[in-house]
Amino acid sequence: MTRAFQTRVLKPESRLIEKEPYYERVGEEVALFEAAYASQIPLLLKGPTGCGKTRFIEYMAWRVKRPLITVSCHDDLTAADLVGRYLITNNETVWVDGPLARAVRAGAICYLDEVVEARKDTTVVIHPLADDRRILPMEKRGELLQAPPEFLLVVSYNPGYQSVLKELKQSTRQRFIAIEFGYPDPALEAKIVVTETGLDAQNADKLVTLAQMTRNLRGNGLDEGASTRLLVHTARLFKRGITPAVACNSAIAEALTDDPEMLRAVNELASSLF
Amino acid sequence: MSLPPRSSDLRLAAAAPEPLAAAALEKRLDELLDAVLSSRRTATRLAQSLAPLPRQRQDFALHWVAVIARTNPELAYQFAAAAAPALAILDFSSAEAWIIEAMDTYDREGLYRGSHVLKSAEEFAGLARRSSSAVGFEEASCVLEIFICALSGRRVRLDTAAHPYTDTETIYLPPRLALAATKEDNFLLYKAMTTLLWAQGRYGTFNADLQAICSGYDDPQDALAILNFLETVRLEACVARLLPGLAREMARMRGDEASDARWLPLRTAAATVNDSILLLRALYGDFVPPCRAYMTTLQPDLAAAVRNARLAREKAGLQSALAGMMADAENTASRGAPSGRISVEFKRQCKAGEKRQYVLKIDGEPVAPPENVTQLIDSILQDLGELPDDYLLAAGDGGSRPAGHAEPELADVGKGAYHEAGAFFYNEWDHKRRHYRKNWCVLRELDVQPADAGFIDQTLGKYRPQVAQLKRTFELLRGEDKLLKRQSDGNDIDLDAVIAAYADMQSGMELADRVLVKRHRTERNLAAMFMVDMSGSTKGWINDAEREALVMLCEALEVLGDRYAIYGFSGITRKRCEIFRVKRFDEPYDTSVKRRIAGIAPQDYTRMGVAIRHLAILLSKVEARTKLLITLSDGKPDDYSDNYRGEYGIEDTRRALIEAHRSGIKPFCVTIDREARDYLPHMYGPVNWTLVDSVAQLPLKVADIYRRLTR
């Protein structure tokens, strides 16, 4: 018997987040977001990977009831990928909007994840959109899109990358209101793990301690410590009956590093804790 | 020389050739040990003791006598004397370990200690019996160093000592552990020892003056032993609260020891070293502390010295940093200067194992301390448990740097016998031993004495047409945006292609889908390190040619935009290896660099291995897809006295290059030595070198070679 899989096809600009995403407030970020949104000022989310930036945006999109269009930036992402381009169909050239143009038209929240990864020319299209002009120039069409008040540009960036090439220029960063995200404090992080996965509090505490220990290794062999997201993954494995040693190895140690000594050290930490 | 026989060859013993007779042995030993033999001290006894051994063992002994004699003939004599009984009880691989240990000890601590190891072959035999389950310090420490760093957030150095202890900055562990039956358990012993020693510092064992307390007893050693046990009990409980998994394993290792009600109070979270001291008073007398496999020792005198030095340093650092904060506060304060009252308020008492939370206040106003202040306060809190008021007096120059000299990098200084600031220590490969000599070379980075930049202008004048030509060739290499046409995907429409496709379609042909243009950037993501031979043999026109070559190279590379650095190397003996900075990666090609190029002057010898190791580390810190280490050389590696010349130097250099290669660096050598064919292929590989056979050609060739290399 074959079962028909159901895959829903959605247009991002018309999709609203229906269910409230689980999000724990860390500080003033919700109020800040709402104030920025009301004042039409774009936002810059800073913070290490897996600390809840994307979840926060989903939560806020749900709160303000606007569609969310996410673009994960990579080093081949060009301005045309964001704005749009001409395609050829049936002997004709047809203009197709890119995700940023769609978001502007639909008054959505456009989230450019890891914006430093994108090519430098993308900043050209972001700049006029990110200051008080709020316009998206569509050079190839000779048009300007004026963003409606509902539109919001949000970019994220990880200051932890130790790369001179991957820095945000002053002219870009000074257009944004920045919200810094860190890892939640231990009690809150344990609560997040418990709520997300249903793991018992004692193991959640141990997982958080393990994460903090790996965060101590930042700059001493690890580029970054274990994120909250990794803890949630590990806890899910626990819940499925995987032993702590195996779960920590696959979800934390192997995810953090390939270096054999570092792997062994992280596993020793895990076995010391569980 | 042939390789020494390996243990697996023992089975063939029956087919082995006849053993050497005493006379033949004596003749051979006479040759090898000539320097330390005299009319009263002959090799006759040695030869007689070796004569009964099978031929393979004799060969093994003779091979190592020869190897050790190259290091120190006296040590070789001692070895020859100890060889016969030792080879009777050790197999070849443990004998090799025994010899290497002796030579390492000799390198580190001298002849007396080295010979001492040679006399302890029996101990080695005992260890060897359990060698399959033993764990060495080297193996354990690389993991445990990270482990401790994760626990405490700062790097703690690990080192070897006969008994495990800590001076609060370095954790000393035995060189080898074979107490337990399995490898896993022996590693666990290391882990438990390391954690307990870390806990001594973390949970305040040294917060009381243990030395004074113990000397109050009739037998201070006894008292210290009891105190050590009590502290172990207390720290076990501390570790159990933080690391329950490790505590479980430790409990398994100490077996089911009857829990004694007397030390229950030590197991509570509130227990401190003072509780142990109180209990010591009650127990001293007939109490014999039980032993644990992972038992560590207390060295209060060593710990106190290190701790006091650190506290003094941190106090000065904190006071100076606070003064800096005050100065900042004064600059920004709108209402007059602050009176300078700094206070720290602690938040609620927190659980064990957590960092204490506090607020720093200037004149009652909370301020956010900079990171260096936070680190200093945390470190002082860890040592003292509190922050005495006198630590909070702002004093000193107000700079953010702690007063006094800059803290040397712990990782670099003090690893070897030569505690000299600013020195780097590197291992060196001894191909005869087939092991590294640990921290064998002491290397320093120096600046080239700048000379008149007139040399640069002269060179540019001399080669003016060639320089122009060179720049043009290099311009062609420069990575630029290319517009790739007729692509199946891209950013824009290729109108020519569309028209062609349309025409094709009109004429009934298939519509081509490659109608887009794509911008493609060929980036030269490349970093090159030039390592220039500054040995005495380059004196004269070779040196001139080298400098001219560098000038041409810099001119060309400036056009290309590749990142590059230039360092010279020289030195005399392993204790004075020198690297001369000419141009660092982050330095522009400016007048001071030009003056340093002009100032490159012949120095001493060519100890290449250590220079390669050092520069490879510098190069590996640069982020680039391709990393090149290019050596300009005029001959074989060579050094004064200690046997670096010849095979040893070539093998060490080769080893260093292999290490560099492993870390992603591509080595290349440009040489003017016509004999290079004999040894360079062995060191650099068959294609990674080139010979410029006329010195006069060097300035023109080097840039060209670089261009071909990176095309």
Image (cartoon, coloured by chain):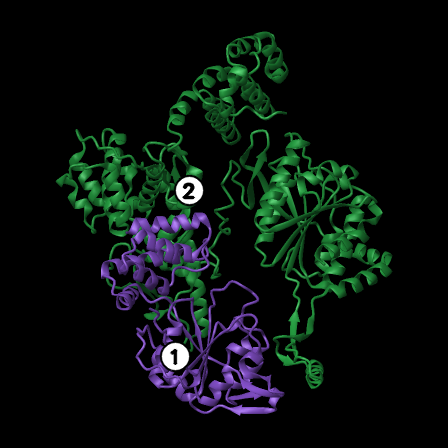
With B594 as the anchor, is B217 left or right in this view? Answer: left
Colour chain B is painted in: green
B450 on left or right of B697:
left
Q: Residues within 10 Å of mark 2 (few under 14, many from 20)?
A: many
Q: Chain of mark 1?
A: A
Chain letter of mark 2 equals B
Q: Secondary structure at mark 2?
A: helix
For label 2, the residue is: B141
Q: Report the disc number at residue A8.
A: 1
> Which chain is drawn using purple?
A
- Tag 1's secondary structure? loop
Question: Where is residue B102 drawn, in percent x and y?
Answer: 49, 26
Quadrant (top left, top right, bottom left, bottom right) of the N terminus of chain B: top right
Q: Amino acid at mark 1?
A: Arg
Q: Are the numbered discs 2 and 1 placed on the same chain, yes or no?
A: no
Which-is-in-front pick, marks 2 and 1?
Answer: 1
Q: What mark, if any, has residue B350 been given in the picture?
A: none
| Vertical relation: B627 (above or below) B260 | below
Residue at (37%, 78%) from the top-left corner? Answer: A58
Where does the image place residue B217, in percent across and percent down from the top left?
23, 32
The residue closer to the viewer here, A148 or B535, is A148
Q: Which residue occupies the extreme front position in the image?
A: A1
